[in-house]
Amino acid sequence: MSAFTLAASAETLYLDLPFAERVRRIADHGFQVEIWDWSTKDIDALAATGATFSSMTGYLTGDLTDPDGIDALLSSARRSLAVAERLDCPRLNLHGTGLDPHGLPVRPVHRTTPAMWLTAADTLRRVAGLGAAAGRVFTLENLNLAVDHPGTPFARAADTLALVRAVDSPCLRLNLDLYHAQIGEGNLIELCREALPYVGEIQVADVPGRCEPGTGEIHYPAIAAALHDLGYTGVVALEAWARDDPDDALTAFRTAFATDRPEGVGS
């Protein structure tokens, strides 16, 4: 039994199945479902699955600092909100800039200036206003620069947390991705402790390989125990490739985040 709401990404599991069937399969296992770029999906088919959607990408193009990029981000955020209403999806995810199909920034930035920080915070305030008007929450996800997303501005967990703190809106929260944070910063339990007041959801995968808990170096049962002790009861989402069988990956994820283990286990 878990104290958390567990979700899993249909983008990374059951890859041999049509997308709507991936969604059904995850939902049949009792998990909420997360998706990425909604513009490539049949939204009516997804809604017809009856799945509970936890999160989706909240923009299609744009970035937080360039004037044209800001306009594009806000425009596609509005379109994303309309889709989120159709799917009854409460959270919409953002990054520091648009990413291409390989996860690389469309407009790489290797040095963020003070002016860019101020502009990014202002853009995110506008995004939070859109969320407030629609009754939805935007989340800003941390990424890693060393392996998956070099050149992405505002990528580190420290960066995304600083921006979310600066905006200080219940409609802009942190999507704390512990896979990315382990690669970029480590010290995950203390990071969770510091970030928790601003967290909208937590995403997980193991390192290296970005597969399910138990396949790498992160001891997720200890993190689950710490989150439980900190009083977190929100969403924990598996955004990971299955090392072998997707059913086994979901079982490993559920087991890692069970909170009814005997006293002392996972601490």
Image (cartoon, helix red, strand yellow):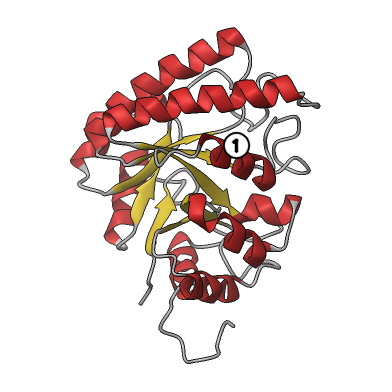
Residue found at the very far top of the displayed protein: 68
User: According to the image, label 1 marks what residue?
Assistant: 163
Front in this rendered view, residue 128 or 14: 128
Q: How many marks?
A: 1
Q: Position of residue 49 (x, y in %)?
A: 22, 44
Vertical side of 120 occupied by 87: above or below? below
Question: Quadrant where the N terminus lies?
Answer: bottom left
Q: Residues within 10 Å of mark 1 (few under 14, many from 20)?
A: many
Task: Identify the image quadrant of residue 222.
Answer: bottom right
Question: Quadrant where the C terminus lies?
Answer: bottom right
* Residue in the image at 58% along x and 20% along y: 63
* Residue in the image at 80% along x and 27% along y: 110
Res 1 seen here: yes
Q: Is residue 81 found left or right of 153 in the rendered image? A: left
Q: Position of residue 201 (x, y in %)?
A: 46, 52
Vertical side of 157 occupied by 133: above or below? above
Q: Is residue 189 found left or right of 253 in the rendered image? A: right
Residue found at the very far bottom of the displayed protein: 263
| Amino acid type, callout 1 | Leu
* Residue in the image at 47% along x and 91% along y: 262
Vertical side of 60 occupied by 93: above or below? below
